[in-house]
Image (cartoon, helix red, strand yellow):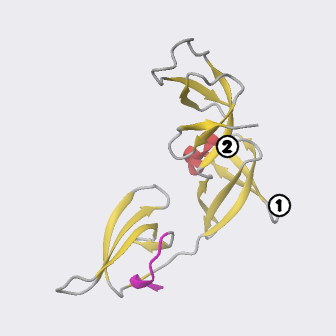
Amino acid sequence: MASTNDLKNGLVLKLEGGQLWSVVEFQHVKPGKGPAFVRTKLKNVLSGKVVDKTFNAGVKVETATVDKRDMQFSYMDGDYFVFMDMETYDQLMIDRKVVGDAANFLVEGFEATVAQHEGEVLFVELPAAVELTIQETEPGVQGDRSTGGTKPATLETGHQINVPLFITTGEKIKVDTRTSDYLGRVNS
């Protein structure tokens, strides 16, 4: 148990029927008149839904222990992603539904953070940007550089994103894992 005065970003709370909520933002408010309160923005750990919730200052809230470990993606086994713990070398099979959009950027050997609560995998978190190779894209049209246009490109994972016209097949690029945006070329 923790007090609402102890809230900080990233803290996971157990609220409303045992659901896990992560604190995204919090603000202690002391109005001129009336009691102090804490305004928070909470994100549901499983669904990703974000809600605003206000607590009275000093109220006790139940916290949840979330174990975050760095793991390496090893291989796919049907609908399961197999990750290996880098310290113990234990393997963990994670369902595609739990991996979610991170599956679009996972290549064998990539490291990710796997969050668990009481033995259940909650989510897989990738770094903000990853380096991937363009598997297929159409050649850019000569002379069409001033418009700053984009074209579709397929990454080595099979995920499709938009890239600038000058990018060619086989190039290594940096991609934002949160938005699927092209960030730039990778200098070899």
- Which residue: 73% across, 42% down? 77
Farthest residue, direction right: 89
Identity of the amino acid at label 1? Tyr
Q: Specify whether residue 79 is in view.
A: no
Percent x, y of residue 124: 61, 55
Q: Does dot 1 land on a helix, a strand or a loop? A: loop
Quadrant where the C terminus sits is top right
Kindly identify which residue carries mark 2: 106
The boundaries of the magenta stretch are 1-9
The image quadrant of residue 147 is: top left
Percent x, y of residue 152: 54, 24
- Which residue: 32% across, 69% down? 53
Percent x, y of residue 21: 45, 67
Q: Name the mark nearer the viewer: 1 or 2.
A: 2
Q: Is residue 15 left or right of residue 127?
A: left
- Which residue: 67% across, 43% down? 106
Kindly identify which residue carries mark 1: 89
